[in-house]
Every structure is written in C-alpha cells, then in structure tokens.
Amino acid sequence: MVLLDRIESNGIDAIVLYSLERLSRDMLTLLALERFLDERDIELHTVEGQVDTSLPDGWLNFAMKAFLGEMERRQVKYRTKRAMEFKKSQGAVVGSVPYGYRRNGNGLQEDPEEQEVIRIVNQLYKKSPRLVDICRILEERNIKARNGRSFTSQQVKRLITGYQNSFVKANGTLGRHIRRFIEAVA
C-alpha cells in the first residue's frame, strides 16, 4: 500500500481523485480511509462531485458518495446473483463448468474420468477428513486437477459431498481486523 506508506511518512497534504469510485466502492474502506486522513490533517478532494473533506458540507458529500457507492456495489452483486439463479433455473450453464462435468451445448454431461476422481476424493475423505492428506494422496497417485497441477485443499473441498467447513468466515483475519477497528474508533 504505497499510498498509506506515503501518508504515514507525512509526504502529502491532500489527495485528489477523479471520483471516490476510483478508490473504492466499499463504504467501510472509504470511511476508515477518511478517518485515517483526518487524523493526519490530509484533505480529500474529487474532481467530479464536490468532495472536499476540509469542509463540513464536503465531508457530507463524501459520506453520501461512500454510501451510494456501497449501495451500487450491493445492487450489482444482488442483480448478478438473481440473473445467474434465473439462468440456472432455465437450465443454462453459468460460470465455470464444475469439476466432474463437461459442457454439452447449453447443458452439462458427466465426465467419467473426473467423476472417478470425485469418487476417490469422497472415499479418502471418509478415511481421513484432513484436506491436506487427500491432496497428498492424490499427488502420490499422480492425479492432477483439470489445470494439470496438483489439487489444492480448496479444489478438493468442492468435490466432497456434504463437506462441512470448519472455518467460520467471521472468525477469519478480516473479521478480527474489523473487530479491532471498531474497538479502536468506538
């Protein structure tokens, strides 16, 4: 993060952007950055759209643009998800073709070789639920992923029927950082 390093080294007085969307559409990121800049007396300005965080009205415009950018990001995500669900309900193949299948026109058909790998992975999972062990055994058997490389834990996880993820997203690195951020600014 060159910009953050430059800010911390007191190398700038103001940041000028064409628009906030060029920086981020994530409201939390923008608000955190604005707080970071404010603590260092660094102004944020945009060429498009009346953002000048040195003024109360400019800060309001900043906050509204951050909110609207977040709204747009979430709307795009929602619309895309709905469109993909609709296409799937119509029998269309959307996104990448799942392992174990091949594209057949607008549909999918099973790939016998990949289906065999899925069967092997599920058998191995019943014996040892550790994904790294399964990856190691596949490597020993010279069973490669579709890209010709060794299977990763993430790829193996997607092949396991009824896989129960023990990792909880909220307990991940980002969740811990967000908690520390909230505690720091509260």
Image: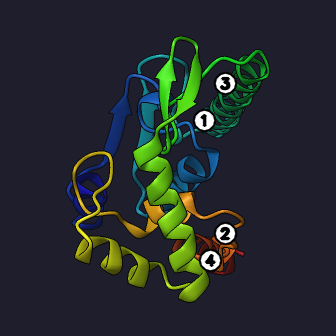
46 left or right of 150 in image: right
Q: To which quarter of the image does residue 174 belong?
A: bottom right
Q: Is residue 169 above or below residue 30?
A: below
Quickly name the residue at label 3: 80
The alpha-carbon separation of the residues under discs 3 and 2 comes to 26 Å
Residue 154 is situated, as x and y percent measured from the top left of the image, at 46, 63
The local secondary structure at tag 2 comes to loop
Q: Residue at 44%, 58% (x, y): give it.
A: 117
Residue found 60% across the figure and 33% down from its top: 58
What residue would you read off at disc 2? 163
Is label 3 in a helix, a strand or a loop?
helix
| Coordinates of residue 10 in the picture (x, y in percent) | 24, 62
Q: Residues within 10 Å of mark 3 (few under 14, many from 20)?
A: few
- 136 vs 186, left or right, is left
Dot 1: element: helix
Q: Amino acid under label 4?
A: Phe
N-terminal-most mark, 1 or 4: 1
- The answer to which of marks 2 and 1 sits earlier in the sequence is 1
Q: Are marks 3 and 1 in contact (CB under 8 Å)?
A: no
Comparing labels 3 and 1, the label whose residue is closer to the camera: 3
Residue at 65%, 17% in the rendered image? 92
Q: Is residue 129 above or below residue 70?
A: below
Residue 153 spot, x, y in % from top left:
43, 69
Q: Which mark is residue 167?
A: 4
Residue identified by numbered label 1: 62
